[in-house]
Image (cartoon, helix red, strand yellow):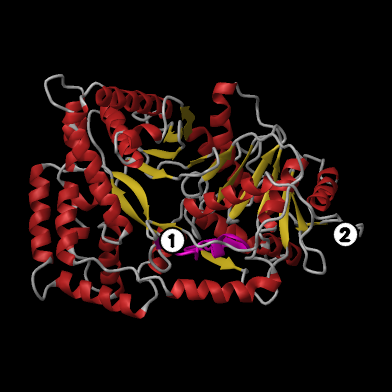
Amino acid sequence: MLGILARTMAGMVKPSCLVKPVSVTRIAGRYLAHQEGLPKLPVPPLQQTCERYLAALTPIVDPEELNHTRKLLEEFQKPGGVGERLQKGLEQRGKKMENWLSDWWLQTAYLDYRMPVVVHSSPGVVLPRMEFSDRQGQMSETLPVEYLGGKPLCMNQYYQVLSSCRIPGTKRDTVVNYTLDKRPPTHITVVHNFQFFVLDVYNSDGTPLTVDQIYIQLEKIWNSSLQTNKEPIGILTSNHRNSWGKAYDNLIKDKTNQESVRAIQKSIFTVCLDAPMPHASDDMYRTRAGVQMLHGGGSRWNSGNRWFDKTLQFIIGEDGTCGLIYEHAPAEGPPIVSLIDHVVEYMKKSEMVRTPMVPLRMPQKLHFNITPEIKMDIEEAKQNMNIMVHDLDMKVSVFSHFGKDFPKSQKMSPDAFIQMALQLAYYRIHKRCCPTYESASLRMFRLGRTDTIRSMSIDSDKFVKAMDDPNIEKVALLDKAVKAHRAYADMAIRGQAIDRHLLGLKLQAIEDLAALPEIFMDTSYAVALHFNLSTSQVPAKTNCVMCFGPVVSDGYGVCYNPMDTHINFAVSAFNSCQDTNAARLAQALEDALLDIKTLLEQTPKAKL
């Protein structure tokens, strides 16, 4: 297990031009030149957003409510009216700032959000159980610019995930990043049996430790932390943000505690050496691994073996389970998965570097002074974590009948194909359609984060309602729904979707200290934002899957990685909601994918 980990860490440290002191200036120069060449995020036209908003509402609100919203939108768009004033304010903000949205989005979506980051915000990634053959090798020291459809993408998020950490506040959190310090961090933190250690991963001459050296240091950590009776200080980070903010202020009053916390926050990333989880059958292994990545299994297991505020935590179980969890504020899934692909590729190569014979210092153990008050905070966090653990309903599965290959053979977008199957699965269970969130990357723009692809549309609504009716021609409806999804996705990545624009108009009104326009207090707006399906395609070369919790109490979280001949799915729901069930949706999704395939195969190509 430690051998696996040493190689994984070498893979993270070696390509890490981001953390190597000697290369920061060189990288920063090239990075800035690339960033400045990217276009700014546009502010979409007001009329276009209002029209598209009405279209998105059509299948989810009743006609009377829709009519009321239509009137509000007409009033909002009047020449010289509120909408025009807010639109001009947004356009001015767009001229002044690198990105009119990114700061607002970081605050409203993450730092102002007061629910625990565990389950509600931080995604986990399950990696395959790996068999390792030999030692690993060198990797290039550059971070290649990524492209989408020939256009360069913003690389900023890569520079946010290492040496960064979220800091709790009693009302609002912050994020700190030490990557561009004059002396960037050269250590990682390792946690085993709830005990934290600092492990320097660079030698004094600036060269990274070899795999053998890392292995030796990990072994020292392992052997000096075998006691299992320690207070799980890390579980504090899983609590409600206001509670944790208060406990944090109390914790760092003590100088030893403050220094230990700073060491964790500054570290390049954290590695969690987990105790074995309860045995699971092969069928349930992926699901058990999914929950281990998301929350650690509860206070009895590994939930205290984390620092959930840390942007990047690699998790390695004694039983070979491996993956990671990341704090969502600094980055989206795709950059995280690209780093995983980078590491996995690295691990396939052989290391040619000879291990120096220099003895290495013992990794430093981080100490915490636990007062009775901190002990009470830990107990409260344990109880709350165990409630969350019992409430999360998870199913991680592999759809093995086909992958991207089949939709491509039908000249359909694999993502749109999967999203239509998801719409059908939900409709068959709940007998209605629901607002659906699919994240779209805005990395074509400087400092771009995400916008929403609204996968449930007028066209998807018609298709799913027709699918089980033998008297209706379905293929044309499917084709139209898939094309509508593709068009919306293309529109979203070009910065022309509706959700972030509407949010911007709302926040502009708040910033202007103006009365909130009626469209934002309208029932339709609340309905539109109640995403019963929160979904994300996170494709990777590695056979992994990302997982996250639902965003509403009666909803599902669905993440998928479409490979060539299979699709990895992770579906979540809450046990406290009687109407939702993760395994039932996962099964309905499998049935829907197969039924759509059968439908297309039974239809002569000329009809398409």
Q: Are marks 1 and 2 in contact (CB under 8 Å)?
A: no
Q: What kind of residue is marked 1?
A: Asp
Image quadrant in which the C terminus is located: top left
Front of the two marks 1 and 2: 2
Number of marks: 2
- Residue 262, percent across and down? 68, 65
Residue sitting at x 26%, y 39%: 434
Residue 107, can we see it? yes
Residue 443, can we see it? no
* Circle 2 residue: 361
Residue sitting at x 25%, y 24%: 599
C-alpha gap between disc 1 and disc 2: 41 Å
Observer-nearest residue: 570 or 594? 594
Along the horizontal axis of the image, is 61 left or right of 239? left
Along the horizontal axis of the image, is 68 left or right of 404? left
Please check the rendered image and state whether residue 164 is part of the magenta-colored stretch, yes or no. yes
Q: Secondary structure at mark 1?
A: loop
* Circle 1 residue: 112
Please give the range of residues in magenta. 151-173
